[in-house]
Amino acid sequence: MSMLITGGTVVTATGTLEADVLIVGEKIAAVLARGPATDAATYAAATAATDAASSGPAGTGPTSNASADTVIDASGRYVIPGGIDAHTHMEMPFGGTFSVDTFETGTRAAAHGGTTTIIDFAVQAKGTSLLGTLDKWHEKADGNCAVDYGFHMIVSDVNDATLKEMEACIGAGVTSFKMFMAYPGVFYATDGEILLAMQQAQRTGATIMMHAENGIAIDQLVAQAVAAGRTDPVYHGLTRPPELEGEATSRAITLARVAGCPLYIVHLSAAQALEAVAEARDAGQNVFAETCPQYLYLTLDDLARPDFEGAKFVCSPPLRTADHAAALWRGLRTNDLAVVSTDHCPFCFKEQKELGRGDFSKIPNGMPGVEHRMDLLHQGVVSGEITLPRWVETCATTPARMFGLYPRKGVIAPGADADIVIYDPAVRQTLSAATHHMNVDYSAYEGMEITGKVAVTISRGRVVVADGEFKGSPGRGS
Ligand code: URP
Ligand code: ZN
Ligand code: ZN
């Protein structure tokens, strides 16, 4: 089966192009420039199109007159690579409960929001093996996902067996291992354990992902706050100061430098942490970082909302003040922040967040977001914080490159998977729990009005969402 997307503006990490996109089966067969080739990018695309079309069933040279079984009119819309969310937690055990999106509901919501691949975290429990953990996560995901998926591994038990198994994980397709400097007694690893894992990553070509907060110091601040009766959700933020994220980030960078392994700082929220990353990158170290929409749009004021409403915004690292958000937008422009992911980890307000009424330290950490990442970052284009190509680069192309999916994913080019989103940049929408598709009883962005919305999501050549309607099926994702 073939499909032709006509009339749209193709946006890639390197620029925009007035072109039609031909899909044959699950792959992009050609990118067909419309009209005369006027610049180098157009010429390159036209050449690629000519090459692909000469061996394919349809398509021609620089000016598109291809035909196909299905034609989708994308006039006035952007045609972008499907989003890649490199940080999600579906069905994650945490704080005595589980995040409420299953792989089925979470990937369906992702598709609605223009994300065609998620990379979730398999969570090693203490005393268990990495490969056994990976099997367990495949059991949860396989046959249930609406879009494609991959895994990172959370390493919470560093020992000789675990270190050996890291190599086997790479054989099984997992090349990135998350460790925690936070959460003592749960996921926390000592500096020595982190160094050992980093040395193994250096030997095997893996990447260490780091949750960089000084959990030992934070636990003291939390105990002091609770003992003094400061138990409202806002104290979650106040007991996790940005300095302790900056300190842990610097320490992780130092350990990675000693071990010689690549380091990827997850969910970076503090200006101090960004400064440490920028300094290391300027010095030529292989250090990368991601941030998340909640750190760009929400603040400590949300954590301070009355009547326990602040619990909806409890995540770690916590929301910061607005000056940190401004620094993060700048970091996205300078590439010190290379990726935007969601850290989607949804807990319902009722019965889950409520576990922490009277003691903020018992509120499960995490926020919903997988559905609105592409929209919220497009809003950054609308407000002039980032460019259109940068939107695509941070939300699709770089995550694909970072985690071994490129050039199969993250790009619109002949030979790539036909994971494509047709995005309407003019439609206005209001974010709300009443209309979202995530399996959670609140929206962190309730009532927020934004410009832009997904019109069509295509996953490996199949329309999975069109005009707000889900057309896919669980199990189609691989
Ligand atoms: O609060 C968060 N971020 N919850 C998810 C687990 C993690 O640390 O990524
Ligand atoms: Zn984390
Ligand atoms: Zn996370």
Image (tube, rainbow, N blue to C red):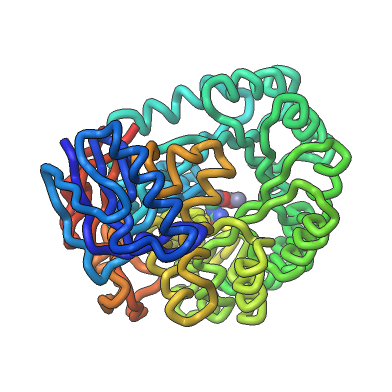
Closest to the observer, 335 or 309: 335
Residue drawn at x 50%, y 66% is 293
Closest to the observer, 368 or 334: 334
Give the x, y percent position of residue 470: 18, 51
Residue drawn at x 18%, y 40% is 2
Give the x, y percent position of residue 459: 29, 43
Residue drawn at x 72%, y 69% is 241
Number of callouts in the render? 0
Closest to the observer, 160 or 42: 42
- Where 7 sits versus 160, above or below? below
- Where 435 sits versus 112, above or below? below
Q: Left or right: where does residue 190 sit relative to residue 421?
A: right
Is there any visible trace of residue 345 in the rendered image? Answer: no
Q: Left or right: where does residue 14 sit relative to residue 478?
A: right
- Where 381 sits versus 337, above or below? below
Corner quadrant of residue 269: bottom right
Corner quadrant of residue 402: top right
Residue drawn at x 29%, y 63% is 35
Is there any visible trace of residue 302 in the rendered image? Answer: yes
Where does the N terminus fall, quadrant-wise?
A: top left
Q: Can you name the residue that lies furthest to the left here?
A: 69
Where does the C terminus fall, quadrant-wise?
A: top left
- Where 125 sits versus 376, above or below? above
Give the x, y percent position of residue 263: 72, 45
Corner quadrant of residue 12: bottom left
Q: Can you name the residue that lies furthest to the right here?
A: 258
Q: Left or right: where does residue 2 sit relative to residue 169?
A: left
Give the x, y percent position of residue 276: 79, 61
